[in-house]
């Protein structure tokens, strides 16, 4: 599983761009999260079920992003998602956004937390098994 | 109270604009809501207290917007907020966004709902009294 | 063409929701625009070409939205788009967002403008012909 | 100048939050950019003038963010901005978001680019002098 790569296509709409004519820097993080959500869904995991059955949510703890080239309005982008490191409560992803070349390169760490206290808890077993 | 007008200043940042060089049409609705929030705060009403003490939130039920002229990056805008009609569960606002002239003109109706069921309920008495 | 209806599927991600647990009211307008963009694309019209070849963009002039029921995180929504009225420079759309029932109902009028002056201009002929 | 710290207050509105009840992780980057914009303005630099007179814009090249604790709806936050490293074309900022304690800690590097080619260029002299 750690070697598998998941690809999700994203289209750039006006909402994603800014007056400099390119995608606004924060909005790439939306694309990254859409891809992580669809990656989980492809594994058979729906996040509302995670919350209802286990009382947990995944929250982002750390982000490193390198912006190499700008994406523009109407671009069709490929977001790649791969697990880089996995522990009992945390998943570190390597995620890249590509068009003809790599535009954005990132590492994003999410942690499984209790949905009320936001304290870290173990990732539910059946999900850990899917990921390992 | 129905004649009073509340003015809130908003600055246009890159996040608000799009690749056409102007404020993205949905984002004016964010400015409108910031102004309604600050209008409530100026009346002494904090929305988390509304939720904690009364179990209610205000949700938008209807919006009419006329986009007359575009706002641009770095503009300083004035959002005016005035109650146009008030009933037991609903408030209809007239809100305008102005720079040198009126750029956007809107009517926005919010309804007081139970925070769990989203069913309309009476606006808490002490708030109705503030508004009347 | 005036009777044709175009359907575009949209998934609700965390970015679209707010602390009330539902889709933030301004964000439905993003879904509406994605659907109008894909409707144009389905007709063979790419907006960057409109700008490069004709120097025009479509901007929103008027919006009326009725929020009937809230959409929630992870919902899969269908956005329907239909031309309601067409003139030389303007298109009025009827757009609805549906899940099990209609959640949001809107009329949105866009106007074709010169990309520099933002003054209304005639919609390029080959596009008018596609729409009629 | 390198030791000076600039503080900008930001209020959390519904638009900034998500269905987990906290500020959406990408939106802190909007707060960071508002603070950098106001820091530049406090130095007497308006970005549209940068573009008109020098043909340059600042774009974000790198971001590192640690999310320590979540901000919530209606919070009033202080964003601190400090130059950490300065070169001919780049500024690396240390930016923190604080409430009662530090919620978010970041380093953000912007590069001065030609507004058309997006190629790095020297920061205009009068701005470099302001920063040094």
Image (cartoon, coloured by chain):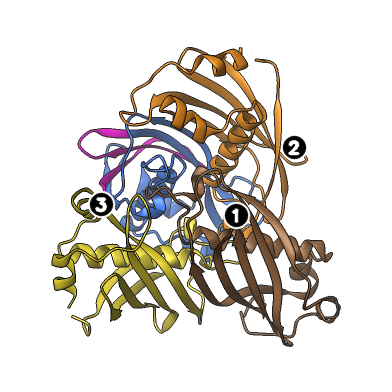
Chain colours: A blue, B brown, C yellow, D orange
Q: As rendered, which of D61 and A54 lies closer to the eye?
A: D61
Is residue A76 rendered magenta in the image?
yes
Q: State whether the magenta stretch is mostly helix, strand or loop.
A: strand
Label 1 chain ID: B
Residue A108's spot in the image, x, y percent? 45, 37
**Where on the picture, by quarter, is residue C119?**
bottom left
Residue C27 seen in render: yes
Q: As rendered, which of A123 and A17 lies closer to the eye?
A: A17
Tell me where the magenta segment starts and ends, as one range: A74-103
Q: Residue at x 56, y 57 (%)?
A: D18
Q: Nearer the viewer, mark 1 or mark 2?
A: 1
CB atoms of marks 3 and 2 within 8 Å: no
**Helix, strand or loop under label 2:** loop
Q: Residue at x 33, y 74 (%)?
A: C78
Marks 3/1: CA distance? 27 Å
Q: As rendered, which of B51 and C108 lies closer to the eye?
A: C108
List the residue tagged with mark 3.
Answer: C55
Query: Looking at the rendered structure, which numbered label has been put on residue B100?
Result: 1
Q: The C terminus of chain C appears in which quarter of the rendering?
A: bottom left
**Helix, strand or loop under label 1:** loop
List the residue tagged with mark 2.
Answer: D101
């Amino acid at each position: 599983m750690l070697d598998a790569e998941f690809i999700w296509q994203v289209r750039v709409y006006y909402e994603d761009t800014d007056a400099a004519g390119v995608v606004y820097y924060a909005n790439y993080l939306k694309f990254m999260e859409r891809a992580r959500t669809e990656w989980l869904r492809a594994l058979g995991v729906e996040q509302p079920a995670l919350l209802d059955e286990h009382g947990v949510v995944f929250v982002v703890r750390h982000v490193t992003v390198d912006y190499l080239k700008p994406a523009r309005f109407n671009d069709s982008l490929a977001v790649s998602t791969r697990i880089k490191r996995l522990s009992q409560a945390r998943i570190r992803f390597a995620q890249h956004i590509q068009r003809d070349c790599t535009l954005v390169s990132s590492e994003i760490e999410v942690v499984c937390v209790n949905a009320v206290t936001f304290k870290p808890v173990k990732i539910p077993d059946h999900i850990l098994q899917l990921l390992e």
